[in-house]
Amino acid sequence: MKDTAIIVDPYAGAADFATAFAKRGVSSVALFSTDAPLETMPWSPELYADVHFYGGDLESLVTIAEKYDPLCIVPGNEGGVELAGVLTERVTPHLANVPGSAPAQRDKGHQYNALVAAGVPLLRQLCSADADEVAEWIVASGLRDSALVIKPPKSAGTDSVFLVEPGQDWRPVFEGILGETNSMGVLNEAVVVMEFAEGPEFMVDTYSVDGRHGLVMVSVYGKHNRGQRLGIYDMGETLAPDDPRTGVLFEYTKQVADAVGVRNAACHAEVILTSDGPRLVEIASRFSGSCMQVHQRVSTGDSQIDRAVRHYLDGEFVPYYEMVKRTRTAWLSAHKSGRLVSIERLEKARDLATFAAAKLPEPGITVTSTVDIDTSLGWIILASDSQAAIEADYAWIREQEAQLDISE
């Protein structure tokens, strides 16, 4: 048995990968797509047998990876998708996606082009660094009096995602994104401008083996806006496998996955169910982040990371999922910036009848007003056979959150 897995950009929840592999006797090697770990992203160096960095010399990196004769090469977060894809093509080609397709599994501009080429229904959008080109496109697309979503092509976790209402000037937002470095250390060399779609938003998490796409979980999002900042997470709740929307969303996401060249490993897609049918917000060839691997396990008894381990070690493919428990994640927001004096109110969530897991902030820390997943205060996962019990406990959490003591 091969005994090493390479994890590219093993930040935050990617620690679950290393832990899951270790339980099966496989050690993990950390490989960063940058020349040093990002200071803004936590990771767990004690979990990795070796650590390497990418300084721009791909051939040297391929040589390093080949020396391990790895079981697999997987991205630990969205920033590692492209490098993991390229290395997999070179080092473990039997586990690769369609050759040359890695950019479409990360960059939203490339995704759009791939969906157009495949004839998959999608939202009107343009990826450009030219404001004049954008202005012409808005008029030509009939969007001059419509709401727009503006974001970087390689954003993640709602980083720098903005809503421009009809009649508002989109140029300041466009110019504010262009040329900035995003939360993953990537320079925004272009900007995506997209029509705003009405309808509920879902995350569709899959795991693929040799071109067969398996559904790990579908969940519905609850989000709110703060000013022009779009998509602050409130909650994510598992959809029942037999819910009619589940099948519709899965069939559409399989088309998207095929279009962007996915054949192996995890995918996380965000899809809006519009009156015209499902429409992609974005997709990435990586596992669902934040606490969603925990949520998946609580709700379905399985997860994308668990499926990955069984894929690489046992050759297993799972086509669908079952729901063990009704499950809802509540993401926590700070209503203003300042010092978080106490979390005593939130600590009592552990006594709730539906409590399953939580990541709570430390009291005394300085927090900023929540505008995206990176500025969230944490999360609480609720699970029960009773939807009414989940609703009641979720309402209680929101009451406590609103009364958090944050001093200026």
Image: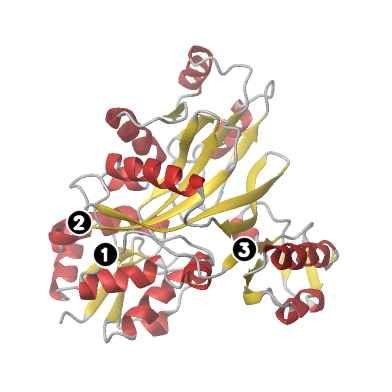
Residue 181 visible? The answer is no
Residue type beneath disc 1: Phe
Q: Position of residue 380 (x, y in %)?
A: 65, 70
Dividing the image into 4 quarters, which one contains the C terminus? bottom right
- Determine whether 151 is above or below 354 in the image: above
Q: Dots 2 and 1: beta carbons under 8 Å?
A: yes
Residue highlighted by disc 3: 328
Rendered image: mark on residue 134: none
The residue positioned 74% from the left and 82% from the top of the image is: 351
Left or right: where does residue 117 sit relative to residue 121? left
Q: Position of residue 378 (x, y in %)?
A: 65, 68
The residue positioned 53% from the left and 13% from the top of the image is: 139
- Determine whether 203 is above or below 19 in the image: above
Q: Mark 3: which secondary structure?
A: strand
The label nearer to you, 2 versus 1, is 1
- Residue 355: quadrant of the picture: bottom right
Residue highlighted by disc 2: 210
- Determine whether 257 is above or below 366 in the image: above
Within-10-Å neighbours for mark 1: few <14, some 14–19, many 20+: some
Rendered image: mark on residue 317: 1
Q: Mark 2: which secondary structure?
A: loop
